[in-house]
Image: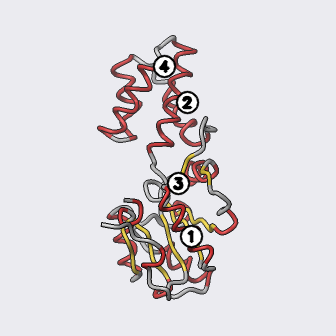
Amino acid sequence: MAALTYNDIDPRKKAFIFELDDVLYPAKDYYYQIYYLFANLLEYTELNSAARTTELMINTYNEKGEGKVFDEIAARLNIDEKYRKNLEIMLLTSRLPLKLLLYKNMLSFMQEVVLDRKKLFIVTNGAAQQQLNKLRQIEWHGLEPYLTCYFTEESVPKPEPDVLHLLMKEHNLERRDLIMIEGSETDRLCAEACGIDYVNVSEIIN
């Protein structure tokens, strides 16, 4: 089945809303690089093997989720609890070795939106500082001036629709003008609560 393109979308839509992680780019690309940096810090301070630590952190992320990573390495590699804060700070602020790359089809989709003089919004859950750090390290290919970002931490997180109501008010948009490119049940519930159309990201990037 062919990927959905911008031309497949109702031309009456005026604005497109995206989550960040796993919608615009693969979230793992951010976390893997942070784990690499953290593992190298531990190798320098505690003489732990950076390669082994990185591998364990990545495997734990994939199998148990981001929230379990430090607990796992603390237990398995006898890492001191004092380093938890280091990892937390790195997850919020670290400069990555490599730029984060948008999904190829998503980049094309967003470029088409801009060429058609429609609006691009990013509405993202999670810690605002961390999400901003990710945004700053994505290779946008010149899309930056056309992006407007809302951090739900500053109002009410999705699936509550408060942030979408704020967006519509601030940009003079109606429900019928919007479409959300969603990547989770949270996004779908938010779109439904607000009464706006949505499309799953897999239809575009696959």
Q: Which residue is mark 3?
A: 102
Mark 2 in CB contact with mark 1 (< 8 angstroms): no
Q: Quadrant of the C terminus?
A: bottom left
Per the image, label 2 sits on a secondary structure element best described as helix
Q: Residue at x 39, y 40 (%)?
A: 67
- The mark closer to the camera, 1 or 3, is 3
Q: In the drawing, does residue 81 fall left or right of residue 151?
A: left
Q: Nearer the viewer, residue 126 or 174?
A: 174
Residue lying at the far top of the rendered structure: 47
Dot 4, how many residues are within 10 Å of its Cα: few (below 14), some (14-19), or many (20+)? some
Q: Which residue is mark 2?
A: 86
In percent of width and height, residue 47 lies at 51, 11
- Mark 1 / mark 3, whichever is N-terminal: 3
Q: In the drawing, does residue 193 fall left or right of residue 102?
A: left
Per the image, label 4 sits on a secondary structure element best described as helix
- Mark 1 / mark 4, whichever is N-terminal: 4
Q: Which residue is mark 1?
A: 121
Label 2 is placed on what type of residue?
A: Asn
Separation (CA) of disc 2 from disc 3 = 28 Å
Q: Residue at x 57, y 66 (%)?
A: 150
- The mark closer to the camera, 2 or 1, is 1
Per the image, label 1 sits on a secondary structure element best described as strand
